[in-house]
Amino acid sequence: MTTTPATRPVKVDDLIRARDGQYLVLRVRENGGLLKARHVATGKTWHLVPRNGVWTRL
């Protein structure tokens, strides 16, 4: 599975891939530097931040 680059602009309802799976974006804050997203497999909500070019849970 390839990850969605953290440099790509995202918006609400986008499906992105992080290191630990796919997430559905619920909210975009800090000009795209902080996302609130729901993990597709577990249904848990996390904040994601860009680290080393990919989205990572906070």
Image (spheres, rainbow, N blue to C red):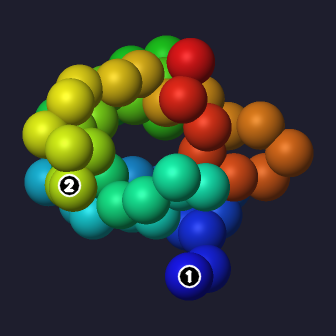
Q: Which label sits on residue 22?
A: none
**Secondary structure state at the residue bearing disc 2:** loop
Q: Residue furthest right?
A: 52
Percent coordinates x, y for residue 11 in the rendering: 28, 49
Amino acid, disc 2:
Val
Query: 55 or 19, which is in the foreground?
Result: 19
The answer to whether residue 14 shows anywhere in this view is yes
Q: Is the residue marked by circle 1 packed among few (<14), some (14-19), or many (20+) residues within 10 Å?
A: few
| Residue 41 falls in image quadrant | bottom left
Q: Residue at x 61, y 37 (%)?
A: 56
Q: Which label sits on residue 40?
A: 2
Q: Residue at x 20, y 55 (%)?
A: 40
Q: Residue at x 60, y 69 (%)?
A: 3
The answer to whether residue 27 shows anywhere in this view is no
Label 2 – label 1 distance at C-alpha: 14 Å
Q: Which residue is mark 1?
A: 1
Pointers 2 and 1 in contact (C-beta within 8 Å): no
Q: The C terminus appears in which quarter of the rendering? A: top right
Q: Residue furthest bottom?
A: 1
Percent coordinates x, y for residue 2 in the rendering: 61, 79
Q: Is residue 32 left or right of residue 24?
A: right
| Residue 36 falls in image quadrant | top left
Query: 5 or 30, which is in the foreground?
Result: 5
